[in-house]
Amino acid sequence: MGKRFTDTEKWKDKGFRSLTPIQKLLFIYLLDNCDNAGFIEVDIEFWSYQLKTKEHELLCEFNDMKRTIEVVGSWCWIPNFIKHQKNLPLNKSNNAHKQIISLIEEHKSKFIASLKFKQFLGANEGLNSPIGKGIVKVKVKVKESDLLENRRLIESQCRLHQSKEDEIKRHISRFYLKNYASSETDKTLEEIISHCTNWLAKQDIKKYIEPQKHWNEE
């Protein structure tokens, strides 16, 4: 029987607290059953059998867990799994890490179009960890929700501009419409957030009055 670390602080985390009871159960199940790099093949029928839930209900709950997991095709990836298992930074000279690096390489082609996955690869490329090398520049469509649901971005901008959350979100939507709504990009999510932060710094948040016409028509 395998043993894994569990983060007891997750019960205080806003993201985890926002999950429904079934989603919390499913998330813990995924943590226990994914491979050592955080990947697991989606099998709603089997999961619902093991969790004693109705298949269609579990599928709906699974589809609503976008902020917690990354799903591409028939595969699921838990972005923070390796971090919470105390395996970062990865080191190719570490025997325990060799399998993890191998699994990441195995699944790289499936998830390379994912902004979160590309960000993970870039953040963990280094002298001892080769996983970010040879990243193919793939252009993907950024979703507005990637920015509007990013609590770190929202909360930091609220503090910086001393503004309410809905005001900041209006400006982030404006930024998205102007820069990413109509085209694809090869930037990582972190690069887009940095772009957004720099753009917001130039805006007069308090004095801006929403025009009658739609922002993307400006």
Image: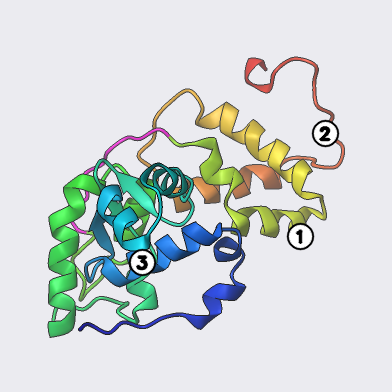
Tell me the quarter of the picture where residue 206 sits. Answer: top right
* Residue 213 screen position, x and y as percent: 74, 15
> Label 1: how many residues lie within 10 Å, few (<14), some (14-19) or many (20+)?
few
The residue where tag 1 is placed is 159
Residue 51 visible, this angle: yes
The residue furthest right is 207
The residue where tag 2 is placed is 208
Q: Eyeballing the image, is 37 above or below 49? A: below
The residue where tag 3 is placed is 29
SS label for mark 1: helix
Answer left or right for 125 relative to 160: left
* Residue type, label 3: Tyr
Q: Nearer the viewer, residue 159 or 22?
A: 22
Stretch of the chain drawn in magenta: 133-141
Pick whichever of labels 2 and 3 is earlier in the sequence.
3
Q: Eyeballing the image, is 104 above or below 127? A: above
Which residue is at 39% across, 30% downward?
A: 184
* Residue type, label 1: Arg
* Residue 83 screen position, x and y as percent: 37, 74
SS label for mark 3: helix
